[in-house]
Image (cartoon, rainbow, N blue to C red):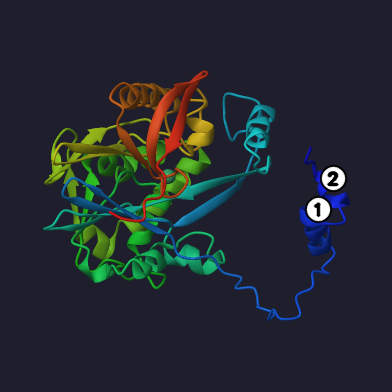
Amino acid sequence: MLTRRSMMQGAAGLGGAVAAAAAGSLPNAAWAAAPASGTQAPGFYRYKLGEIEVTVINDGVSRMPVTDGFVSNVPKAQVTAALTDLFMDPNIYAGPYNPIVINTGSKLVLVDTGTGERAFKSNGGINGRLLLGLAAAGIDPAAIDAVIISHYHGDHINGLLRADGTLAFASAEVLVPAPEHKFWMDDGEMSRASKPRVQDGFKNVRRVMSGEVLKRVRTYDWDKEVITGVTAVGTPGHTPGHTSLVLSSAGKQVFVQGDVTHAPFLFARHPGWHFMLDVDPVTAETTRRKVYDMLVSDRMLVQGFHYPFPALGHVEKSGEGYREVLVPWSPVL
Ligand SMILES: [Zn+2]
């Protein structure tokens, strides 16, 4: 039987090679010493949806400490146990960020923007990687015709601006959900915000959605086409005007869920968990269960902003919730 112990003990064959490699004594006089690259590749992934070409761009991850209030309605120990079961650091939640670019044939449209270049420069490149990813994918930011925003949290809007405060997508209209814009731009709502996190959200929205960005803002409504082939679906709770999109082309559909769940390995599997960033967690849970039941019964593809890259998959019923089944990498379109 092959065990770690037998592998490490063996003097010949696999065991010997592993033991020798571990000791740094593999006979390798002919090999050159290669310096470690020390950097990760930019992440982009393409797929066709009927006539639409979608490019998923990885913006990086956020690493948040798992605190007592991280999931407001379950003890922290339950969250750390779930992360341990997933072979992840039990104390740190690594939430991925994945904006997408849609090429409809007549328009090039970005959906959500990641945390932005300013974050990239201050955090060592752990997130805010969208512009890098676009460059790697051969997409010129100046060629983006429109940016569709799902909701007004910083990881979705901050990338509208470069680090110097200028527009990241100079020729793009900024299409925003009407109820979301109304909520965050309302001074009364801002003054009534009680949670510090929501107060900070208001300050950030007022910083980003101003000046040149605000001049380019056009609101869109739920249950209507935002652009041809892209329909807005109200999925409130995470924020009051949180919006998902259904992309449709030639009989194919994908549900672009935004933050209906944060990372699925915690929040699809535990749809009853109330994530600290949900503005209205009870409504968010109702929305989540409704959307996920629909995704299961329709066997519909889902593109999840906070899913692991390339953030595309299906969901099935599992245990007390749902389990994501991510698409395998396809080398051709
Ligand atoms: Zn988010």
Give the mark count. 2
Q: Which residue is mark 1?
A: 15
**Label 1 to label 2: alpha-carbon separation:** 7 Å
The answer to whether the residue labelled 1 contacts the one labelled 2, judged by CB atoms less than 8 Å apart, is: yes
Residue 64 image point, x, y percent: 59, 47
Q: Quadrant of ligand 1?
A: top left
- Residue occupying image coordinates x 45% and y 33%: 324
Question: Which quarter of the figure is the C terminus placed in?
Answer: bottom left
Quarter where residue 239 is shown: top left
Residue 153 image point, x, y percent: 40, 47
Say few, some or many: other residues with alpha carbon within 10 Å of mark 1 (under 14 / 14 to 19 / 20 or more).
Answer: some
Quarter where residue 35 is shown: bottom right
- Residue occupying image coordinates x 19% and y 35%: 222
Could you say whether the residue bearing mark 1 is in a helix, strand or loop? helix
Left or right of 103 in this view: 39: right
- Residue occupying image coordinates x 48% and y 35%: 264
Please say if 172 is above or below 66. Answer: below
Say few, some or many: other residues with alpha carbon within 10 Å of mark 2 (under 14 / 14 to 19 / 20 or more).
Answer: few
The amino acid at mark 2 is Ser
Residue 129 image point, x, y percent: 44, 63
Could you say whether the residue bearing mark 2 is in a helix, strand or loop? helix
Q: Which residue is mark 2?
A: 6
The amino acid at mark 1 is Gly
